[in-house]
Image (cartoon, helix red, strand yellow):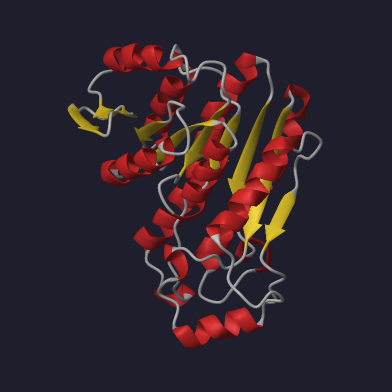
Amino acid sequence: MILSSKIKFQRFKFNNIKIGEWYSRYYCTSEISKIKNSNNSSNKEIAVITGGTRGIGYAISQKFAQNGIRCVILGRNKETIENSIKNIMMINDLEHVGMVCDVRNYGETVNVCENISKLGSINYLINAAGISSDNLVVKLKEQEINNIIQTNLLGTIFMCNNIVKYMIKQKQGGCIINISSVIGIDGNVGQSVYAASKAGIIGYSKSLAKELGSRNIRVNIIAPGFIETDMISEIPENKKEIIKSNTALNRFGKPEDIADAASYLAKAQFVTGQILIVDGCLNI
C-alpha cells in the first residue's frame, strides 16, 4: 500500500496488492489502522527506509524484509514505489507500506513520520536517500549545491529529527543507520559538495549517538565505497578499471554488500556512534 500526504487521490490494484494515495490525513489514518491490525503484520518490527526504491535503499528493504521486518519505503516517485512494494511483498506476507515523501521538504517529513507512527512502534530508520552530482568547484551552480545538501544532509536530519520523537515516546529504544560515503571521509576531486554533505552526515550522526544513547537509541553510519548503482553508471569505463585496480578486492561493491552491513548494525546492540566502512579496501 502506498500512502501520501499529497493533496491527491488515486487508487491502483494488481496481484491482490492494493496501492493507493490518500487525499486526507483522516482517510490515511483509517487505512493505517487496518494495516496495523493485520494478523500478518501485528507485533512485527518496523523499518523506515528513505530512498528505498532503488540501489542501496532497495537492497536494504529487501534484506530487512527477508529478516522478517516490515518495511515502510519512502520515495518521491509513485511508480517506482509501486514496483518496489510489489516485489518486496513477494518475499513474505507481511504488510509492507510505501509512502510518497520528498525528504528535502521538512513539512512532508513531519507528516509522513506522524503517519508511520500509527502503524506501530518504529524500530529502525535507514536514511539511504541521496544524490551525487560531480563537478569542479569553479563550475558549481547554486541550484546544484542546494540540491545535494538538501537531499543528502538536510533530508537525513529532517527524518532523524522527526522519527526520534516517536522513538523516544515509545520508550523501547531504536536504531538509526545513516548512509554516508568514504568520500565524506577522504574527499575526492570534483565531489566537494557531495563530500561536504556526506561528512556532515557523519558529524551529525556521531553527535546524535551521544545525545540519544541514554534513550537506548543507537545511531551508526555506513560509509560505502564505489557501489554498482545509478550513481556510477556514468563513470567512463577506463576510470572504472582504475578504481577497481585501487580496490583490494578488485571490484565494485554491490548494493547487497551495504544491505548486509545494515543488517549487522540493526542487531548490534552495543555498537553506536560508529562508521562502518564498506569499500573493499579502497585507496583513493
The number of numbered badges drawn on the structure is: 0
- Residue 129's spot in the image, x, y percent? 47, 48
Residue 28 in sight: yes
Residues 52 and 283: in front is 52
Residue farthest along the bottom direction in this orientation: 238
Residues 216 and 140: in front is 216
Q: Is residue 20 placed above or below 105 in the rendered structure?
A: above
4 to the left or right of 115: left
27 to the left or right of 188: left
Residue farthest along the right direction in this orientation: 270
Residues 92 and 119: in front is 92
- Residue 116's spot in the image, x, y percent? 45, 23
Q: Is residue 142 placed above or below 17 in the rendered structure?
A: below
Going 58% across and 25% down the picture, which residue do you hit? 45
Q: Quadrant of residue 67?
A: top right
Residue 180 in sight: no
Going 28% across and 41% down the picture, which residue do you hit? 78
Quadrant in which the C terminus is drawn:
bottom right
